[in-house]
Image (tube, rainbow, N blue to C red):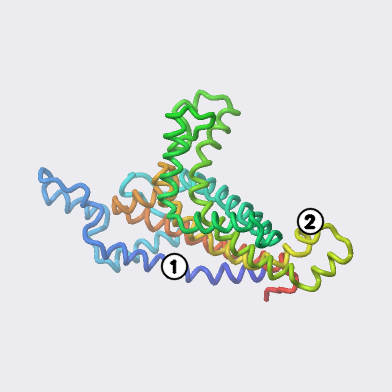
Amino acid sequence: MFAFLGRRLLGAIPLILGILTLIFFLMHLAPGDPTTRYFDPNISPEVIAQMRANLGLDQPLPIQYLRWMGAFVRGDFGYSFGQMRPIADILPEVMWNTLQLTLVSLVIIFVLGMLIGIYQAVRQYSTGDNVLTFLALFFYSMPGFWFALMLILIFALKASQGDWWIQFPASQMTSLNYGTMNPGAQIGDRIMHLILPSIALGVGSAAGVARYMRGSMLEVIRQDYIRTARAKGLSEGKVVFKHALRNALLPIITLMGLTLPYLFGGSVLVETIFAWPGMGRLIVDAVFQRDYPLIMATSFVISVMVILGNLVADALYAVADPRIRVK
């Protein structure tokens, strides 16, 4: 297993370098450069030219690429043009924020989605199955950014206007008086700020997981060994969760590997809407500022996380089904 994972990691290195090379040249296809935002009729062209020379932007594109790649291979991500500080200091601040949002969303997606799918499969064609099928299709077809705006409108704006018993903050990770709270109140404040963005990011995908889980469970619970388990007098809970669930997990594990790219892509919109200071919002700001080194660094981090997520999915195949052996 470890040799397999090691080979996959080594095989991912050319893939990551290829992705970064493609992003580097695509970025430079857009007109303008990072000095464009300093353009002002009162600033002389000589000053702009000097700024381009200081940033190395006056060099031919292949030279810029080789210089960046050389620094990247040595582990030097360079300086952010927009924030004027080392990228190595910026990334740790935002990565943890995005990881919090992504991990909570993953729990919502797979725990909620699997429980709904199992219930629908066990209660096939019941009223609950039909209602959950309708709700799953409703949330699955809803655009994420619109769902996020509706959550803010109802559970933040309307809740505060109507003085509801529960109200959620509309933006940011913490309240303004976070620093004056005791540790327990700070944890509660973080959780309250985390709920709406996590729901906006996770509920649509949870609906999709529920549909896959329902179909996979329906196929498994009709097998002969499930009938045998029931004939032996095992409780329905043991039959479903011990014998059927494990064999129905393979499509869900595949989805787990495919969900990570969606989560990072969706977090760009959700973090922007909720003013969440994470990787997605950082990428949006970097793109608008033409902050080339920061775009490359964030692209590298996201590529590595996606590849690691797929490696975990490969490893889980063997755990869920011992008949699968990696070579």
* Foreground label between 2 and 1: 2
| Observer-nearest of 224 and 191 | 224
Q: Position of residue 121 (x, y in %)?
A: 68, 62
Q: Position of residue 43 (x, y in %)?
A: 13, 45
Q: Amino acid at mark 1?
A: Leu
Q: Position of residue 258 (x, y in %)?
A: 54, 64
Residue visible at 39% across and 46% down in the picture: 272
Q: Amino acid at mark 2?
A: Gly
Q: Disc 1 on helix, strand or loop?
A: helix
> What residue does disc 1 label?
17
Compared to residue 131, the image places residue 246 above or below, namely: below
Look at the image and tell me whether residue 88 can be seen.
no
Q: Which mark is residue 282?
A: none
For the residues marked 2 and 1, what is the alpha-carbon distance in whole angstroms? 48 Å
Other residues around mark 2 within 10 Å, as few (<14) / some (14–19) / many (≥20): few
> What residue does disc 2 label?
237
- Classify residue 155 as left or right of residue 286: right
Q: Position of residue 65 (x, y in %)?
A: 33, 65
Other residues around mark 1 within 10 Å, as few (<14) / some (14–19) / many (≥20): some
Residue visible at 30% across and 69% down in the picture: 62
| Between discs 2 and 1, the one toward the N terminus | 1
| Observer-nearest of 99 and 164 | 164
Residue visible at 46% across and 30% down in the picture: 175
Quarter of the image with the C terminus is bottom right
Q: Disc 2 on helix, strand or loop?
A: helix
